Image (spheres, helix red, strand yellow):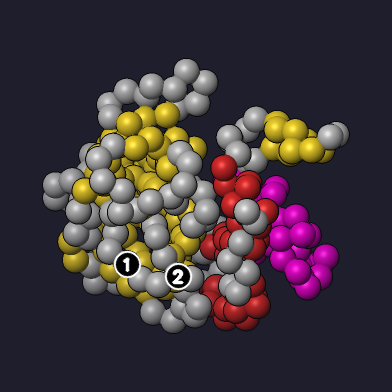
Amino acid sequence: MTRDELIALLPLGEPVEISAGVIIERRCFMTTLALALSAAVIPGVVTAKLARLGNEQLTFEEFLKEVIPVARKLVGDTSIAGQDQYLQTLATYAIRLVDVPVPEMRDSGQGAGPGTFLGFNPGGDPFTVLHWRMEPGSVIRTHAHTYGNVVTLGLAGQIKIVNFEMVGVRDFAAKGTFKVRQTQAQLLSPGDVNLVNLECNYIHGFQAGSKGGRGLDITTRIREKKPTPYLNLAKKADGAKQKIYEASWTD
């Protein structure tokens, strides 16, 4: 078993002794500005520029110009840590975006009912920038990301995002019921980000607030494209310490 496979099996937020005197704790990254601006996140960025990152705003064109060369250097490491570094780096640039053009949109095809829309802002590489809008009270069904990791950025309104992952070995073709663990519940406001690493937090669903919301999904395909599995989730958790739910896949 590789290091990443071992880490993926560890419980969230609980110290575990893996050998005599060696204790580790698995924490799947959910960005904060302080962490995102740490020097370890963006190799090669000089200290002076790093200190300005939180204050400088970027147009969409400036965002693409600055982030693409860095993203191309980091995208090849698809381990848990490598994806975290890549996603954190994209996030440090994305949170500075202002006046992102709103493209033509169509029904997202992922809504539990009407009111969810999706468009495309061109120019990303190695990522794709999807621009979404949700009407008040609308829902994007809880679904797994199997081939692309994601930086979700809030641009307007407020959206509740809940992340999950399967307990034990991932199996997106599993029949019948299995268990999933809730790893994050977040209110996404303008300037906030939610990250989907394909090794953790890789299932998520969206619920719009009373004013709806709008944002970006900066998605990077790092695995073979496959159909998106949607999650049927039990209404109540059955885990005493962690939020564990019975679940099943649906189309």
Which residue sits at x=54%, y=63%?
94
Which residue sits at x=35%, y=64%?
131
Q: What element carries label 1?
A: loop
Q: Tell me the residue that label 1 is attached to.
A: 226
Relative placement, left or right, of 119 versus 125 is left
- Indicate the position of residue 75 as horizontal and vertical percent values: 59, 72
* Of residues 116 and 174, the one drawn nearer to the viewer in this rendering: 174
Which residue sits at x=14%, y=50%?
114
Q: Tell me the residue that label 2 is attached to.
A: 223
Instruction: State whether residue 31 is above or below residue 66.
Output: above
Segment tinted magenta in the rendering: 28-56
Q: What element carries label 2?
A: loop
Q: Do the residues labelled 1 and 2 touch (CB within 8 Å)?
A: yes
Q: What residue type is labelled 2?
A: Arg
Q: Which amino acid does label 1 sit on?
A: Lys
- Indicate the position of residue 164 as horizontal and vertical percent values: 42, 41
Which residue sits at x=39%, y=57%?
145
* Of residues 53 and 4, the one drawn nearer to the viewer in this rendering: 4
Count every numbered label the image shows and give the total: 2
